[in-house]
Amino acid sequence: MLGSAAVVLAPSILPGWALSTVLDGSSDRFRKVLLAPALGLLLLYGLSGTLVLLNVWSPLLMAAGLLAANIVAYRLIHQRHEVLAKRTRWQMLEAAMHGEISEESDAPSLSKEAEIQLEFQQNRSTPLMALSMVVAATAILTPMIQRLPFGVDWIGFAMLTQQLVLEGNLSLPGTNEGFWTYPPAFPSVAAWVATLSGHDAGTSVFHLGHYTLFVLLMGLMGALDRHGAGAYAMFAMGLGLGLFAKTFDSGFPSVASQLGLVVGILVLFRHADQRQRHHTVGLCLALYSVALIHPTGAIYLALLLLSHVMHGLAMDNEEHRELVRRLAYIASAFITVGFAVALLVIAPRLFDEAVFSEYGWQGGKPLVVYNGVLLLLGGVAAVALRKTLEGRIAITWFALLWLLSIVHLVEGLRFIPVLSLLSYTLYSMALHAFHIPLAVLVALWWSPQTNLTEQNDSTSTASSMPQALSLGLVATVVLGTLFAQSVAISLAQHEELMAVSPGDLELRDALKDIEGAVYTENMHWGYIWDAPGSVQTTSIPTLGLVHITVSEHSNATQAMFLDNVSYFVKHDMLHALTSPLGTMQWTLAASPYWATSVQSDGATLWRLNPDGNAPVMLLTGIDEDDCASCDVRLDPWRNHKFRDPLLLGEDRPFLPEGTEGELQVQAPENAVNMCLVYEVIGQTDGLYLQSATGLDRPFHGLRTDAGYHQACFDVDNASELTELRLEWDRSEPTLWLNPLGLSGRDTVLLDKTGVKLQWLTWTTE
């Protein structure tokens, strides 16, 4: 993780430092330390995404672009003018921060701004700042204790990353021809990490996603430090779950696109007379870079800009209104270009797609679930800050975002590409749309040091959060952080939550000795993000918009069902890869044309046997009637399994750790070998299988690390093999918080360690 962070931070820190200097001339070194990693990473995303758009991405050109950016940044930081007339406004503000007196007409406003910022910097609470930075740093703990992320989205990002590493573009890999349309910035920076660090694409995506969350939190602290609320920004973020849940679920580009809001908060939460041309340039640069990461961030930043313009135009000062108009003209032109691309290039490809609302109304229950505490405190903060300019901007910003969630009202409506595109862009906005706006509002109310701009009709000063409530919330965030990290450490022992099994990962090494096409399942566990260049896989994830001109996957699947050997020979597709999470293994096990080549815990690499003399295996499913001591649990991947020849259904028998169970079996008459496929939930103590009669040995120890496993036993007397007994070392299960209980993929939140019984595979004479 630290190596991945270094290859991103090292080339981006100086450009980020320069941008923080330009956008906030009043910032001291400490604030720049908070801002520079986030702003530098945003520029890195913009540069990398641009190279992909120009179809010239390569590590060498990335290095050249970063070198040029660092040279420009160095000159920008170290260039100083002795003649006052040549100084930019941010340089004059820097001078005012150091006590120099300018003779310019705006010297009084510069001196006042410098005086306020110096007061903020002198009154920083060092303990609170240190504590908030420690809380933010916990965002990078997860990649240090587990090898791959949870969720499923990361697999698609890893496929894009691998393709950029190998080809430098987003063309489809393997036996497919076509291309992906997806914002290129995140996968291309992940490809940069993979190239320089030597990590595989999946690990690089994982590390980059969590590093991005960390610098985003630091950047928000730096942006709100300008209002004296730096430490409170992190504490306010800690009261919501949205972005943290999105990161846990591997929605990394959506989180990364929030980096533009650091620039938005730094530039737009200020009075118009403090905003200059370089702020507008920085804002447009942020909009461009964010659009290359994910359109959600661009939409959120554009709505913040709209809120700023709405309140700026309402000012009585005509000079200030003119400044706002100029910003509105420039930003409108910029946004118009973005909308033109969306409407003319992307939206027409969604003409046949319906408006999508997987999680229902994002402004309703999902908002309360993921940001309920912030919503409650934000309501109180809105009342307290309603007469300040910054408070009104934040309130209007949240309201505009909330209005976007009404797209769910037209769910299912077809042939309106714009609405379809909007719905697919915002489908989980409860997690990533409201977290930062509410946190900004709460942080501005929470801090006792803010100097907010009172509106003309206001005669009272905005109140801050009561001290007792403040101390209580700080303690709550710290305790919540400790609890969250203990949960993260616990979940690191639950590899069964991953979308690939441990056996799937082990079999990747077996592909290195293969050339030609390999059949892979069209599911998350079948997308091989680290396939060797000599291997052509058949399946690809449907990430973003996929344009396919040629694909052999459906033909190969049909040929597999029909035992069409000639098809596989013709297409040089002599191997197939299956996962214990999938269903194609059941077809291949019963076919005389596919033989096991390599196996690892239920994951299998099959080799085509054109002569049709491969061993045929018999498979029998295990249900709750076969295990009286077992509970009934849902299969979390039930919605991704479209064939059920074993009649397993959606449920699986689950035996909690410490509970002895008897499994009733009916062996074929001529069985010589039996394999039990089972799934361990969490890391358990010893698990043993016994059978007084029927097996070659009566007592066997089973693997107990989390995930799918396959244990095979020689059968001595099939007619006497009627019962298998399962015993444990531990007498009680370990309890753990199962995140699938929140997502709906499972029904249990407070879960137990144990074992799920899947099916039996018999080899006969």
Image (tube, helix red, strand yellow):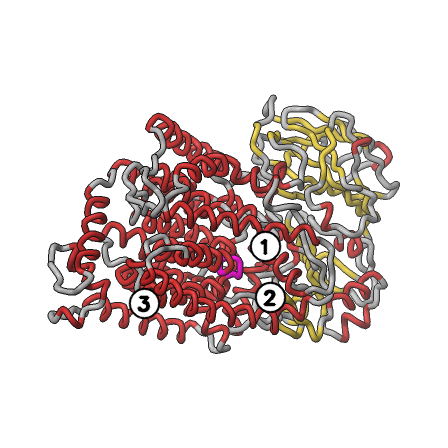
Q: Secondary structure at mark 3?
A: helix
| Image point (29%, 59%), residue name | 273
Q: Earlier in the sequence, mark 1 or mark 3?
A: 3
Q: Earlier in the sequence, mark 1 or mark 2?
A: 1
On screen, residue 447 above or below 657 = below
Q: Amino acid at mark 3?
A: Arg
Q: Secondary structure at mark 1?
A: loop
| Residue 506 appears anywhere in the view | no
| Residue 232 appears anywhere in the view | yes
Q: Is 452 contained in the magenta span?
A: no
The residue nearer to you, when weighing 394 against 184, is 394
**Residue 35, horizontal then vertical, whole percent:** 32, 54
On screen, residue 568 above or below 241 = below
Q: Is residue 302 left or right of residue 759?
A: left
Q: Amino acid at mark 2?
A: Asp
Q: Is 295 contained in the magenta span?
A: yes
Mark pair 1, 2: CA separation: 43 Å
Mark pair 1, 3: CA separation: 32 Å
Q: Amino acid at mark 1?
A: Leu
Q: Which residues are magenta?
A: 294-298
**Residue 484, horizontal then vertical, whole percent:** 47, 36
- Residue at image mark 3: 277
- Residue at image mark 2: 513
Residue 426: which disc? 1
Mark 3: few, some, or many residues within 10 Å (few <14, many ≥20)? Answer: few
Q: Earlier in the sequence, mark 2 or mark 3?
A: 3
On screen, residue 680 above or below 539 = above
| Image point (34%, 51%), residue name | 223
